[in-house]
Image: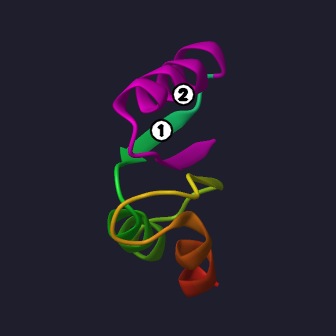
Amino acid sequence: MKVLLAEDDPNISVIARISLEKLAGHDVTVVSDGEQALAEALTQKYDVILLDEMMPKMNGLRVCQEYK
């Protein structure tokens, strides 16, 4: 499964990426702010998009609304 992970906390993103890739076998792309998340979501195909609510530049809810 191809996963987009939008998380600005480096510790959380590392733990989540390792868990998703190594333990579950998913292909994970990590971005650190809402603008990057929206750009990735609009230009690539993902099976799942995981959004942090509180990110720089654009929060997760706004990314979701813009993507929709």
Residue 34 painted magenta: no
Magenta highlight on residue 15: yes
Give the residue drawn at x 54%, y 85%. 66
The secondary structure type at the circle numbered 1 is strand
Residue 35: x and y, percent?
Answer: 35, 71
Q: Nearer the viewer, residue 2 or 11?
A: 11
Residue 38 in the image: state x and y as whole percent: 43, 72
Say which amino acid is labelled 2. Ala
Q: Amino acid at mark 1?
A: Val
Identify the residue at image location x=42%, y=72%. Answer: 58
Q: Quadrant of the C terminus?
A: bottom right
Are there few (<14), some (14-19), or many (20+) residues within 10 Å of tag 2?
some
State the residue at coordinates (58%, 32%): 26
Q: Position of residue 6 (x, y in %)?
A: 47, 51
Number of marks in picture = 2
Q: Secondary structure at mark 2?
A: helix
Q: Quadrant of residue 55?
A: bottom left
- Determine which residue is flagged by label 2: 16
Residue 46 percent coordinates (x, y): 56, 58
Q: Residues within 10 Å of mark 1 (few under 14, many from 20)?
A: some
Which residue is tagged 1?
28
Asked where in the image residue 7 lies, by quadrant, the reply is: top left
Distance between mark 2 and mark 1 Cα atoms: 9 Å
Q: Which residues are magenta?
A: 1-24
